[in-house]
Image (cartoon, helix red, strand yellow):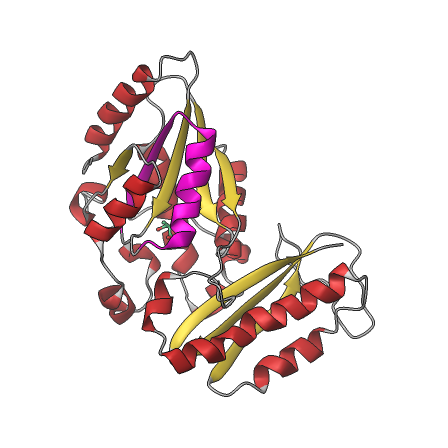
Amino acid sequence: MAATPAELSKALAELLEAAGKDRPGLGLVPTMGALHQGHAALAQAARAENDVVVASIFVNPLQFDDPEDLARYPRTLEADLDLLGAAGVDLVFAPTEETLYPGGLPLVRVSSGSLGTRFEGASRPGHFDGVLTVVAKLLHCAQPPVPAAYRAYFGQKDAQQVALIRRMAADLNFPVQIRPVPIVRAADGLAESSRNVFLSPEDRRNALVLSTALRQLRDRAAAGRPLDLPAALELIREQDGVELDYLQVVDPLTLDPVPAGPEDTLTGPALALAAARVGGIRLIDNMELPV
Ligand code: PAF
């Protein structure tokens, strides 16, 4: 395990040299720990495409707008290391706040612009600036110290985060390929999330309305029928114990709304995004809608 950027760079150099190739593949899986099957899928995707896989575990204070949320974020290092080991990760980078932010929290940060103030950003001011700032740092820290194909893996469940990280990498010329990995769902359909452990059995049953509404939109799109977003909204609003924040059909890259009324059929790629509070826990989910 590496705890400082210098230790990480040294260990990566050794692992990449040991791969014995001119241009080995290096996969980075950034996480905040509290790992679940969704993270295992990220690590497995990285394992399948690269010679060396490194995962980072760092609960990033910059992306929490609520100190209580930061304090109660689950910290499960031993179990996380087991899961990463089983998924074939070669190296874990687990910095502390002092080793990642040695001069204190950074004065200069990455701005997520207008894409970062909508949807999740609307209810969590500064969240995406904090995400992009730490992702920029992690991408730099794990930058291959020898020539290598560099890839980084992010879960599609955080669709807005993925859109922003892709945009940052393109806008600021990061020499890394951003690889989104599909959502992993539990058998009941709930998208895997570190926050699911806080749901009571009843909350969990109520929460399923989110994936049900998204599936309704996806099935209509697949059948070439009008999306009828208002009907899907109604389904969620009628569910006890669920406080809807948003359900919207958007362009997957810009997150601009796509017409989705009772008469509208899709004409291009689209993503349905949803967020709600269930038993006080904020959940997000999304589904790609086929054209
Ligand atoms: O998705 C997450 O777990 C975090 O937002 C990330 C990308 C590791 C940055 O802290």
- In this picture, is 27 found above or below 167? above
The image quarter in which residue 211 lies: bottom right
Q: Which quadrant is the C terminus positioned in?
A: bottom right
The image quarter in which residue 194 lies: bottom left
Query: Which residue is pictured at 39% across the width and 41% down the height?
Result: 43
Q: Residue furthest front?
A: 187
Residue 131 appears anywhere in the view: yes
Residue 172 appears anywhere in the view: no
How many numbered tags mark residues here?
0
Picture coordinates of residue 290, whole percent (x, y): 72, 55
The region drawn magenta spans: 35-58
Query: Which residue is pictured at 48% across the width and 75% down the height?
Result: 207
- In the visual, does 230 lie left or right of 154? right
Picture coordinates of residue 244, whole percent (x, y): 53, 78
- In the visual, does 182 lie left or right of 269? left
Query: Which residue is pictured at 25% across the width and 71% down the height?
Result: 68
- In this picture, is 259 found above or below 43? below
Residue 40 lies in the magenta stretch: yes
Query: Which residue is pictured at 38% across the width and 74% down the height?
Result: 281
Q: Nearer the viewer, residue 156 or 161?
A: 156
Picture coordinates of residue 242, whole percent (x, y): 49, 82
Q: Which quadrant is the N terminus positioned in?
A: top left
Picture coordinates of residue 136, whole percent (x, y): 38, 41
Residue 286 lies in the magenta stretch: no
- In the visual, does 2 lie left or right of 265? left
